[in-house]
Amino acid sequence: MPPPAPHAFTPDSSIRDPKSWSAPETAAQARDALALHLGEISRRAGGLILEAVARGFNVYTKPDGSSYTDADVEAERYILEALAAHFPGVPVVAEEQSAERAQAGEAIGANPLPDAFFLVDPLDGTRDFATGGIEYTVNIAAIVGGTPVAGAVYAPASRTLWVGGAHAFTLKIEPDAPAAAPGDWRAIVTRPVPEAGLTALASRRHADGPTADFLAGLPVHERIAASSSVKFCAIAEGRADVYPRFGQTMEWDTAAGDAVLRAAGGIVTDETGVQITYGRTQDGHVNRPFIAWGDSAASRRFLGR
């Protein structure tokens, strides 16, 4: 069943203006409401991905060698339509649209970007998805002043939705289910570093030497391989402690998971301990190496800051 058209569900008027996302008197409430609304969009886009799985889909190769599928394109088209209808005038930097522009020799998104914009990865973990994996996600984040102020991560295969604004929450929900009631959500928070040592997460398909070297210098008790933004969400839920990534990633890969993790009490820093920022058009929206921490004190402890 196709998802509802964007005009069939609209955000509260109080969050349509991006100024409300950072105004001191409204920011906390607005950020939570925005995160919930981005969750509604992300899970409906997730339904389109599940439809593609059911009917079969084509896999294509971009000039840089990365993959995309029919599901990536369909989910992104829906998200872009919804964001344009619900937040007119707020720019969106989205993965597949950006790839098309880069191939055509155009700038990726507005340059410079305004203070507030969205980052979208319609299908994070495409390589895993294309080979039958189940850890792919839909990622949508709102950025203000380089910081992710609200985000949603939906894992269609497990029907799990994580959202983060001023606070972080999760629940299991079908893509086409009615909006969840407040009591359906479970609040999530990160955990302090366990005495037994760290549970570290690493990319299932993008291992690299610097990341392995970094983990070798930490008191790691357990190491788990995973795909997509579920790694950020596992740390946000207090099921893991650290996720380093020194290989190349893009801002749309991490912003939504970063928003959820920050809302749960975590932090995402570069290798020197400085929090990462978004909207770096001068770098083509390529992230610097980063480490996601559940316990913000751990970044100071292990990075010396």
Image (spheres, helix red, strand yellow):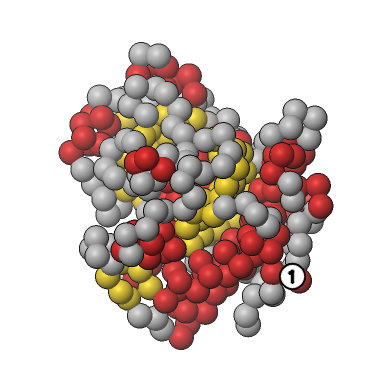
| 248 in relation to 45, above or below | above
Q: Is residue 142 left or right of residue 214?
A: right
Q: Residue at x 74, y 70 (%)?
A: 7
Mark 1, secondary structure of its residue: helix
Question: Residue at 42% across / 50% down in the picture?
Answer: 253
**Does residue 77 appear anywhere in the picture?**
yes
Give 290 or 221, whichever is nearer the viewer.
290
Place of residue 20 in the rendered image (x, y in percent of width and height, measured from the top left) = 74, 39
* Residue 4: quarter of image: bottom right
For the C terminus, which image quadrant? top left
Percent across and percent down for residue 50 are: 51, 74
185 with respect to 92 (left or right):
right
Task: Say which amino acid is labelled 1.
Answer: His
The residue at 63%/60% (across/down) is: 83
How far across and down, in percent of the image, does residue 209 sit?
18, 38
Q: Quadrant of the N terminus?
A: bottom right
Query: Residue drawn 76% across and 71% down?
Result: 8
From this viewpoint, which residue is outermost toward the top?
A: 304
Q: Which residue is mark 1?
A: 7
Query: Looking at the image, which is closer to me, 283 or 121?
Result: 283
- Closer-to-camera residue (84/31): 84
Q: Is residue 133 above or below residue 235?
A: below
Does residue 194 appear anywhere in the picture?
A: no
